[in-house]
Image (tube, helix red, strand yellow):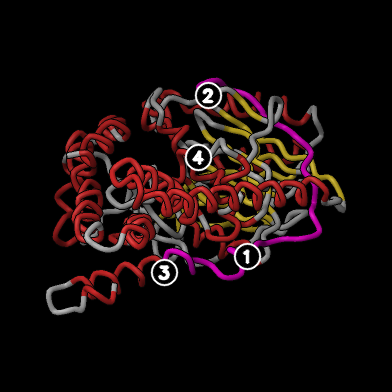
Amino acid sequence: MIGLIFFGGTLWWVGHVTVPGAILLPAALALYFAAWGWLANRFLQTRPLLSTLLLPAAWTALEYLRSHLLSGFGWNLLAHTQWNWTEIIQLAGFTGVWGVSFLVVLANTALCGFLQRRKKGWVGLLLAGLCLLAAFLYGRTVLRELDAREPRAQVKIALLQGNIPQPEKWDESFQEAIWKRYEELMAEAAKEKPDLIVWPETAVPGYLEDFAIEDRLKTISRSAGAEMLVGLPTEDLESGLPYNSALLLGQDGEERARYSKIHLVPFGEFIPFKPVLGWLKKFYPVADFAPGKEWTVFPTPPPVSVLVCFEDLFPELARRFTREGAGWLLVITNDAWFGRSAASVQHLQASVFRAVENGVWLGRAANTGWTGFVDPAGRRLPPPGQIPRFKPGVAVTELPVLSRRGTFYTRWGDWFPILCLGLTVLAFIMKSPHGNSRSV
């Protein structure tokens, strides 16, 4: 019931797209809360100190599974509640986002154990306090090192926020108005003489393979005096497969590179198990994109990679791009689907952790917001480095090209949640009727 209330209360905005989805998605995600409650009931029967460690390990393992099973949906992880506590979230550069979730559960279970057991619970409370203090001091150290790093150069980036309502995006009667909006924003951005201008996901009202659209994009790019990275749908003319893409145009208007979204949204950008579930398309709009296959690092100064829409929910994607050589990360998205809800802020929380995990700058260009820049410590830049939600505008700033890239997490990946998963499975086996509970 707690899981159903939590996910129902934080994901209600899915109903803007699909009412059945707004009912079924929270119900499915609530099963992870139920699984943790069942495991917690078993683990509480162990020694108090051990249960204080097993409960957060089980929670972390379940969040990891939730982020991977059936395509994965790592939205509203417990760690995201700490996104404004800059010192604590630096732990993500070591353990990934998972370590912060572990720490939150550890602190709460230790406090709960102390209130229930008093004398028997003080050791767990002391352990949690020491872990929290260690994470805080570690975060302060990381912040000092980040602030002391000397950039090799400065590169100016401009991010556009068109604020086009979703009902207008694919309505042909609004097509010219959309073009005018982005041409005005491009002219505003060009005044700052940026090196790169970034448009949101599917900002262009049509496919690149339409010659009129291609020509207009080239004209806009040439007049800007800057490279332009734009989100738009594309189509492979040989196979006929459509893609949700990001295209880099040079100052001459010619294509330099493109990225097609690898991790698509199930029931939003494709229907999984289409032979069986294809009939769902009759009841609500579902795109039919194909997944991309190339881990593109765009040849900009410095090299950047793009996460399209909810791809920033997946730490392994941002990590892979960083390992491939991306010096910055860009997120282009369109959360206009969900109206004036909290969805865009919840989405931003995931982006903050991708920056911290890999120690890189991150820029977000979102149709309706949040658009702006996040530094390697997860701190959001003030205006003009961000734009208020639900307003058109340009965010612009000069970003440093840092001499060091990557973190412990970038190098070693999801070692921490895998460790938690292994510990949870081992503890479950040892507590089973056929196991030896005393050894736990």
> Alpha-carbon neighbours of circle 4 within 10 Å: few (<14), some, or many (≥20)?
some
Q: Which residue is mark 1?
A: 408
Sequence order check, earlier mark of 1 and 2: 2
What kind of residue is marked 2?
Arg
What kind of residue is marked 4?
Gln
Residue at 20% of width from left, 46% of height from top? Answer: 281
Residue 346 falls in which quadrant of the image?
top left
Sequence order check, earlier mark of 3 and 4: 4
Question: What whole-number distance in Å separates the C-alpha atoms at marks 2 and 3?
Answer: 37 Å
What kind of residue is marked 1?
Phe
Left/right placement of residue 59 relative to residue 26 reads right
Q: Secondary structure at mark 1?
A: helix
Sequence order check, earlier mark of 3 and 1: 1
Q: Which residue is mark 3?
A: 418
Question: What whole-number distance in Å separates the C-alpha atoms at marks 3 and 1?
Answer: 15 Å
- Front disc: 1 or 2: 1
> Alpha-carbon neighbours of circle 2 within 10 Å: few (<14), some, or many (≥20)?
some
Q: Which residue is mark 2?
A: 389
> Does residue 407 belong to the magenta stretch?
yes
Give me the disc on residue 61: none
> Alpha-carbon neighbours of circle 3 within 10 Å: few (<14), some, or many (≥20)?
some
> Does residue 435 belong to the magenta stretch?
no
Residue at 38% of width from left, 25% of height from top? Answer: 339
What kind of residue is marked 3?
Ile
Towards the viewer: 45 or 160: 45
Where residue 226 appears, as percent x and y from the top left, is: 76, 41
What residue range appears in magenta?
390-419
Q: Is residue 437 above or below residue 169?
A: below
Towards the viewer: 19 or 350: 350
Q: Secondary structure at mark 3?
A: helix
Sequence order check, earlier mark of 2 and 4: 4
